[in-house]
Amino acid sequence: VCKTNRALIQTCSYHYLSLSLSLSFFGLEIEANGATKEEREGEQTTLSL
């Protein structure tokens, strides 16, 4: 999919990189700050209401 031209290769690798970074940070956040994450979700729910 990503081999059509350089622009697509750059966007695909950028999205893959940011996706894996997001997953690592998400995993670290779950391990280190599980309660904090739940509190944030509560705040987001309150803000959306």
Image (spheres, rainbow, N blue to C red):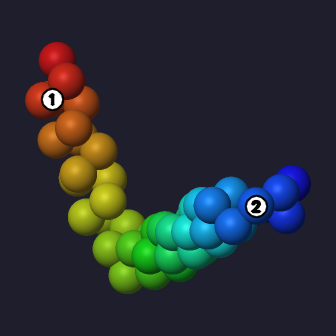
Residue at 56% x, 68% y is 14
**Which residue of the protein is positioned furthest toward the left in this rendering?**
47
Left-right relation of 22 to 17 = left
Image quarter hosting the N terminus:
bottom right
Which of 3/22 is in front? 3
Residue under label 1: 46
**In the foreground, 12 or 28:** 12
Pick whichever, 38 or 7, lies toward us. 7
Left or right: where 4 falls relative to 29:
right
Residue 10 locus on image (x, y percent): 61, 68
Which amino acid type is shown beneath numbered disc 1?
Thr
Q: CA distance from mark 2 to mark 1?
A: 45 Å
Q: Relative to 35, does residue 40 appear above or below in the rendering?
A: above
What residue would you read off at disc 2? Answer: 5
**Residue 36 percent across, percent down from the top left:** 25, 64
Which amino acid type is marked by label 2? Asn
Image quadrant holding the C terminus, namely top left
Work out whether mark 2 precedes mark 1 in sequence or the reverse, and give the earlier one: 2
Secondary structure at badge 2 equals loop
Farthest residue in the top direction?
49
Residue 23 can be seen, yes or no:
no
Task: Report x, y in % for residue 19.
Answer: 57, 65
Q: How many marks?
A: 2
- Where residue 9 sits, quadrant-wise, is bottom right
